[in-house]
Amino acid sequence: MGDWYNVERVSQPGSVILAAALPALRQANAARRAGIVQGPQAVDGSMSMAEFSDWVSGLDSRSTLNERSAMCVSSVYACVSLIGGALASLPLKFYRETAGGREEFKPDEWWLFNEQPFPCWAAAPAWEYSAWALLLQGDAFWRIHRASDRSPKIVGFEPLHPRTVEVLRVRDRLAYRVTAQPSQQSNGPTVVLDQDDVLHVPGPGFDGLRGLSQIRYALSTPGMIAMSADDYANAFFQNGSRPDYALQTEKNLDAGQIDNLRNQIADRHGGATKAFKPMVLSGGLKVAPITMTAADSQLIEQRRFQVEDIARIFGVPPFMIGHTEKTTSWGSGVEQMSIGFVKYTLQRHLVKFEQEINRKVFRYAGRFCEFATAGLERGDTKTRNEAYRIALGRAGEPAWMTVNEVRRRENLPPVDGGDELATNAAAAPQGTQQ
């Protein structure tokens, strides 16, 4: 107590603690403005270094785009939720090569990826969280937990927040320094993992260490414009949909009269609850609007454009997030739209997850995993029945599916004799005259 509380310290003006912390805060603030993350940041309810810097400097948390403020934009939220929900709904199936092709099997990892990857995580939320990390932060990380330090047996996959992971290059391999979150102190404050113990799925622009963060690059300007438009609309309606105005008079008013007039108007007509009270002007005062209307500023058109721009960044057709102003060129019918979404949007993410899982979990050829996208590409009843009719073999056409294979696709039990391909013996008549 005597060493800390001394005359020299307490005689300094201002806060001694804040004065010592301000240089680090300024450095962190400048690095964040430049798009550089210096060390892991808090990801729970506590305040991160960047947020504390904003609080000290008086900046609003919405003045910069981060993963929280980005999700406040409806189009960003819709795109991330759509892709994350689609990823979470796809079962991950496992196969092994055979002499005749391949066969499906269920290893121990099937349960981890499809039901519960970690004791406190169900599979669907874990996949959604990975999609959120990949789409907004640029990287998705899952820590591989094994039965022991020397055992190859995998017992769990723990999703990690990208800001708690630092990627390092050690010669021709990668190492991952993971800082535990406050709720995970039982794992220790920091742990360094080899690349074989981490599933790392990077986004576009991967440089060997990390992918590019969409928040700091592609979403930076469109997201901020969308947030600014939301803030403008919110302030406009909070003020009773009344534009800014000025009071004009030919008389000369002193400073006291101006302040008195301004205070009276603010007290009697400020805010949405008082905006519709009639204003009585005297002494030759006239009202002159000084702001553009929403129509003149093209607020509605700008907000529509931002929806399309943000949907373009995520590769999502605008109509799939509720933007139906224009017709789609993704084909007609739900089937064609779903196929286009899987082919051009989901597939680029699914391949990365599949390759990372195959090379980290199986370690050798012969066993592999694939996401089953047939559910999303499933057509309507008429289209499916027509396809099954062709697969079972029509008159004069060879069959390439059995009855039980078709019934399995429709989640129906097998029937006796349903495992034989139709021979179509009664084909077209022979010797038919043309």
Image: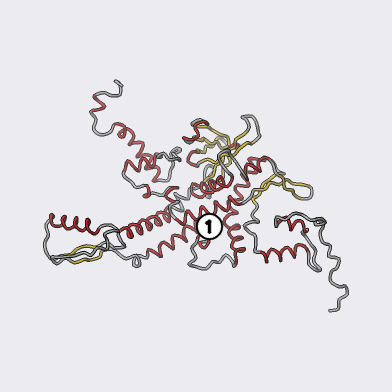
Q: Quadrant of the C terminus?
A: bottom right
Give the image quarter of residue 194: top right
Helix, strand or loop status at disc 1: loop
Identify whether 167 is placed above or below 269: above
Residue under label 1, please give it: 315
In the rendered image, the vertical position of residue 41 relative to residue 8, given as above or below = below
> In the displayed structure, does residue 297 sit left or right of residue 398?
left
Rendered location of residue 384, percent (x, y): 69, 63
**Residue 172 appears in the picture as rendered:** no
Q: Residue at x 63, y 47 (%)?
A: 354
Vertical order, 294 against 431 (above or below): above
- Residue 4 picture location, percent across and down: 30, 24
Q: How many marks overall?
A: 1
Residue 54 appearing in the image: yes
Is the N terminus in the top left, top right, bottom left or bottom right quadrant? top left
Q: Is residue 262 left or right of residue 228?
A: left
